[in-house]
Amino acid sequence: TGIVALCNTYMNAAQNVTKKDKAIPSLVVFNGIDIKKYRNEKANLDFESSKLKDISKAADEIFAIYAGSLGPNYDIPTLLEAAKILNECNSNLKIIISGAGPLHSEITQSIENYQLSNILYLEKLDIQDLIRIYRICDIGICAYGPGSNVAMPDKVYVYFAAGLRIANPLTGELENLLKNN
């Protein structure tokens, strides 16, 4: 009787399938985050009392974070390759990785094998610690692989709420949103 989609890309796909039918009511409802609640929680979280208290950021450092699954649908190998190149160039960009999954050992092995001092692997963090770490980050990384069918990832809403710039490999709706806004 109707179509609800979480982005225009998915709505267009659903409408293409139902074209032959009569007009069906439709609504795009983007996922999101309660900004006021997020910012209130962010302001009330004490960084120094968490397990992240030993993390420090120099004035000239740039922190980029990937927080999410470490599975085969994510382009973690390219992220690690970028870290190697940045490490060789003595870049001031540090990559923070938070997550769990099958590519966990690839991250730890790369850090060890290539002596990647520019990666901080925090494993999986709870939401309060993620909010704390986002406070000192500058860039949120979307690390989707070339075959990904993701159009509007949930993580971007948290990155937006945290005020992060976004590094994104996805073409289409998110790419256009970032370019135009």
Image: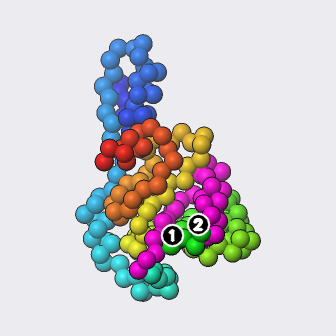
| Residue 14 spot, x, y in % from top left | 44, 27
Q: Which residue is mark 1?
A: 93
Seen at 60% across and 52% down, the residue is: 74
Tell me the quarter of the image containing the N terminus: top left
Residue identifier under label 2: 86
> How many neighbours does mark 1 have within 10 angstroms: few (below 14), some (14-19), or many (20 or more)?
some
Whether pointer 2 and pointer 1 mark residues with C-beta atoms closer than 8 Å, the reply is yes
Which residue type carries mark 1?
Answer: Leu
Residue 30 picture location, percent across and down: 34, 44
Determine whether, in the image, residue 23 is placed left or right of residue 125: left
In the rendered structure, the answer to whether residue 167 lies left or right of residue 116 reads: left
Please identify the residue farthest to the left as the structure is shown. Answer: 36
Q: What is the x, y in percent for residue 108?
A: 68, 70
Say if 140 sits above or below 147 in the image: below
In the displayed structure, 2 sits above or below 147; it is above
Q: Magenta span covers which residues?
A: 59-88
- Helix or strand or loop: what does disc 1 sit on? strand
| Helix, strand or loop under label 2 | helix
Q: Residue at x 50, y 86 (%)?
A: 54
Looking at the image, how many numbered discs can be counted on the residues? Answer: 2
Q: In this rendered view, identify the residue nearer to me: 17 or 148.
A: 148
